[in-house]
Image: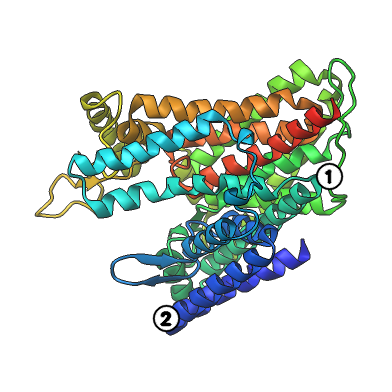
Amino acid sequence: MFRALILMGAAEALSLAAFNFPILSLPLIVIAGIAVFVLSWKNLEWGIYILFGELFFGSRGHLLEYDLGFVSLSLRLVIFAAVFVAWVASGSSPLRGEVRWGWIPKSYWLLLLVIGFGIINGYLRGNSLGNIFNDANGYLYFLILPAVLSVIKTREQINNLLQILASAIVIIAAKTFLLFVWFSLGLPGVATAYHWIINQDFGEITGHVGSASRIFMQSQFYALMGLFIFSFFTLPQPLPSREGNSSPWRGEVRWGWQIWLILAAALLSIIMSLSRSFWLGAIAGGMFAIVVVLWQFRASFKAFLALGLKLGAIAILEIAMLYGVVAAGGGQFADSVSSRTGDPTKEAAGGARLLLLPELVEGIKDNPNLGAGFGKLVTYKSYLPDRVTPQNPDGAITNFAFEWGFLDIALKIGIVGLLVYLLFIARIFKLGWVNMEYRILNMGMLAALIALMTLNITTPYLNHPLGIGFLIFLYSIFHIQYSKNESSG
């Protein structure tokens, strides 16, 4: 875990250096691509760890980025390409028989088929090629699943991935808190930090320098996922079921005090994001966990309740700390919180999202079964202050990317495509559920999946490598569990 922390911290530092000195961007990306390819060629397991590590803490993948004119070269794209090419060219490729294709569900192949059709459909309907590529490229992350399954086969490897995820959560929290302090206290270099976050597309910062600011980053998504995953490591091991069976897998890392550091970091990131979508996802995942505990693991309800109280106490202490930081800068943290707890429909952004809703529904009605293809444009009135101009009095926006996640999918690949996608997710859920003998790990994983599904209603993650990567992460773990059960049976 310590090594992963050092590497991630170094990547953040290099990203900031490249932002300040753009001449460094292309050389650093080239060096990173060559290094990842060589490492993956020698041992694909290293490449998979790097790929997931960047995904866990790299937000939208632009830690390093260079505009070639016809395409933007990002660190995530380079790492993905290097690992994929090394897999195809190495002894772990499907051409050399390392992948047992029976490991991969049929719904995965159907999903690739409808995604491919969505690309062709978009082209035949005259959608812009640039829009088609930018709209569909996130789904291409699904192509890495066979490579992951060809490498990640043991409990030790899963534990390694969990340690990488834990390191990412700590880095995300440290970055979020550092930016919060920077802005709240108006420290030197605040303008550089702001433009680094915005220009590299890491997230957004709202509020005024010297007062409480909202620090939102897309990578905080993995803090939410990690909160569920690691919370259940604190419960009695093994977690007894109604039948009283023992867990056949107790291969977790001996986390000790580190587990509470990870959970505190995850909570801090979620609180400081001031994201209603994250909060709603957390509530949905938490409700699922409560129901399953009462249904399947009633004997551990007291331990589960104690866990909830401890997390609540940590959250209160963190909120008090944030109040202290803001008070030192002369600001009011309550103003930022209250701005996120009001009626979202009365806010400009929330109102714009509702104005988009009927336009999306109408677009789906035009091509309900197979969709309008990737790159489909929709125009809607937003009335957002930064969009309203004399030339655009109603703030009209024309775009191909939309916040209503499931409706975005249905618009592009139709209801048929959406059902196929949901079938693939259901397969992952079922695989985790039938392997509930691995109950400590799976309880948190399935609750995180419920949180992701809820989050995707109003914030699209299932059309992005962040959400897709998490699905691949889950399937890899559940597949290993299933394989172990089959071999032991």
Q: Left or right of 229: which side holds 80?
A: left
- Identify which amino acid the numbered label 2 is placed on: Pro
Sooner in the amino-acid sequence: mark 1 or mark 2: 2
Q: Quadrant of residue 226?
A: top right
Dot 1 crowding, Cα within 10 Å, few <14, some 14–19, many 20+: some
25, 261: nearer the viewer = 25
Q: Position of residue 351 (x, y in %)?
A: 30, 37
Q: Position of residue 210 (x, y in %)?
A: 49, 67
Above or below 68: residue 298: above
- Identify which amino acid the numbered label 1 is placed on: Glu
344, 244: nearer the viewer = 244
Q: Disc 2 marks which residue?
A: 22
Dot 2 crowding, Cα within 10 Å, few <14, some 14–19, many 20+: some
Marks 1 and 2 in Cβ contact (< 8 Å):
no
Q: Quadrant of the N terminus?
A: bottom right
231, 108: nearer the viewer = 108
Q: Disc 1 marks which residue?
A: 252
Q: Position of residue 157 (x, y in %)?
A: 76, 51
Rounded to the nearest angstrom, the CA distance separating label 1 from label 2 is 42 Å
Q: Left or right of 159: which side holds 15?
A: left
Looking at the image, which residue is at 9% across and 54% down? 391
> In this view, which residue lies farthest toward the left?
391
Q: Left or right of 65: which side holds 9?
A: right
Q: Position of residue 237 (x, y in %)?
A: 89, 34
Helix, strand, or loop for circle 1?
A: loop
Helix, strand, or loop for circle 2?
A: helix
Looking at the image, which residue is at 49% across and 40% down? 276
Q: Quadrant of the C terminus?
A: top right
Above or below 101: residue 29: below
